[in-house]
Amino acid sequence: MHFKKPSNVIFMDFETTGLKLESLKVIEVAFKTLYKHDMGYTSLINPHMRVSPSIVELTHIDNTMLRQEGKDELDVVIKIMNYISDIENSVGEGELIYFVAHNGQQFDFPIFKNLLNSNGFSIASNWKFIDTLIISRKLRETPKNSMGFLCGYFGITNEAEHRAMGDVDALSIIYLRLSNLVCNKVQYNTSNKRMDTDTTEYINRTIKNHDFPQVLMKYLYL
């Protein structure tokens, strides 16, 4: 399912010291596209505070790891911006860049904005945001819409759950599965024929198009 051409869709995930946006600190980031040559970017961030036992249990990121391997927040933000710039250059000047996260509107997107703003950067005008949780809820294909439930529903194995890159890899497959369902709902480029969600030809013809994320965004407002 990896793309043979650079992709303008970037999947993101953050691990944090808590859930309250006004007080949490980011302890791990991950960004990646589906382009087969893209290794993505991930890093631990030293929050310069002790992480609670509940977060350590959830993420398996402990205080020793953060102290020894965690980078300074500004250094990581600069690396993130460089990574995004490389993606923008690879897909072409003026192309829209789409950031995808699960529960992004309530969590990842505000965190991303705050992380950039607090380090002297800002959201660019050509950046758009897609929340797979909202897409899943609108599709009403599953009784639950959490990332963990969707992984089970779609048969996705997340071998590094609650680690940023592990969640990004799982998210990218969820995105493809949901995109196929949306295509069938709106009959996008299907010649009025329902197709198997695992059909490689179908994915190649629709979801890999740089304009396809607009289909998802329009679907959310139908």
Image: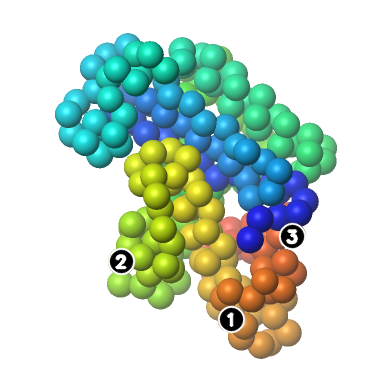
Q: Residue at 52% x, 31% y: name it.
A: 42
Q: Residue 196 got which mark?
A: 1
Can residue 214 be seen here? The reply is: no
Which label sits on residue 144? 2
Counting from the top left corner in percent of width and height, residue 105 is at 43, 45
Number of dots carrying numbers? 3
36 in relation to 110, above or below? below
Give whichever of discs 3 and 2 has the lower sequence position.
Answer: 2
Instruction: Tell me the crowding category of disc 2: few under 14, some 14 to 19, or many 20 or more residues within 10 angstroms, Cα based.
Output: some
Secondary element under disc 2, as helix, strand or loop, is loop
Q: Earlier in the sequence, mark 3 or mark 1?
A: 1
Identity, as a three-letter code, of the amino acid under mark 1: Asp
Q: Left or right: where does residue 20 sit relative to residue 53?
A: right
User: Which label sits in the foreground, 1 or 2?
Assistant: 1
Q: Give SS at disc 3.
A: loop
Pointers 1 and 2 in contact (C-beta within 8 Å): no
Q: Nearer the viewer, residue 145 or 160?
A: 160
Left or right? Give the position of 93 relative to 210: right
